[in-house]
Amino acid sequence: EAGVAQSPRYKIIEKRQSVAFWCNPISGHATLYWYQQILGQGPKLLIQFQNNGVVDDSQLPKDRFSAERLKGVDSTLKIQPAKLEDSAVYLCASSLEVWGGVTDTQYFGPGTRLTVL
Amino acid sequence: QKEVEQDPGPLSVPEGAIVSLNCTYSNSAFQYFMWYRQYSRKGPELLMYTYSSGNKEDGRFTAQVDKSSKYISLFIRDSQPSDSATYLCAMRSGSGAGSYQLTFGKGTKLSVIP
């Protein structure tokens, strides 16, 4: 079974530029998550999708971050404009869980390492 | 006070040692407890998943949950150099809105020296 795919693996940009990350979850997984992992910290949830609907985006800085999941499969996360503090690894995860389920395993992709100069 | 506290280490042990990794938490609603392993430049992978209090064993790994003390542990027996990684604890409440959201610790970096 193929895992969660992410691209690019690395990205270096200047502050105030824009950047986009792509995620392809495990086939059949209804739920998709984007996390931000700052160096030395645990992952922090940014947004969760259930199929192509947003379930939770309470920790997404909506003035600069946006995300979409068209057709309930692939997803993109965009930052515009980027700030120095956005330097982090952006992890995508997916799980089979549907709304109301109490058990799930989140499978993580390798992440995109973003450096903002 | 952070919801989940985890000593970031680093922790260095000789091969074959027993390793003990721990997290404390403050949210009494947490019911599901997980340990993830994260190798350098990789995403986290699930190691252990436990519900409520008690022990769970899987090969060389044992997870313990003590809800009365709000304390969870991961033990690694006969540690191997391949166990060198960052270990993240994570937990969730399991019911109600937002129950799916995992709260992670900072992770403990472990090195097993041959």
Image (cartoon, coloured by chain):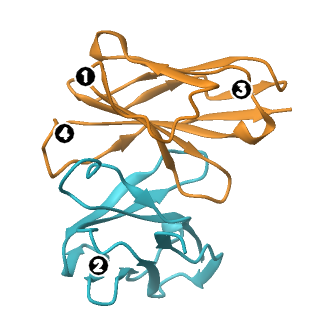
Chain colours: A orange, B cyan
- The spot of residue B92 in percent (x, y) is 30, 60
Q: Secondary structure at mark 3?
A: strand
Q: Tag 4, which secondary structure?
A: loop
Q: Nearer the viewer, residue A87 or A109?
A: A87
Q: Kindly identify which residue carries mark 1.
A: A51
* Above or below: residue B85 compared with residue A34: below
The residue carrying mark 4 is A97
x and y percent of residue A51 in the render? 25, 22
The chain ID associated with circle 4 is A
Q: Considering depth in this image, is B14 or B101 the residue closer to the camera?
A: B101
Quarter residue B109 falls in: bottom right
- Looking at the rendered image, the disc whose residue lies closer to the viewer, 3 or 4, is 4
Residue located 29% across and 18% down the image:
A52
Q: Which residue is mark 2?
A: B62
- Please state which amino acid type lies under the numbered disc 3: Lys
**Residue at mark 3:** A11
Task: Identify the mark nearer the N-term, 3 or 4.
Answer: 3
Report crowding for label 4: few under 14, some 14 to 19, many 20 or more residues within 10 A (C-alpha). some
Q: Left or right of B91: which side holds A41?
A: right
Nearest to N terminus: mark 1 or mark 4: 1
In the picture, measured across the screen, residue B110 lies left or right of residue B36, that is: right
Tell me which amino acid carries mark 2: Thr
The quarter of the picture where the N terminus of chain B appears is bottom right
Q: Chain of mark 3?
A: A
Which residue is located at x 39 percent, y 51 percent?
B45
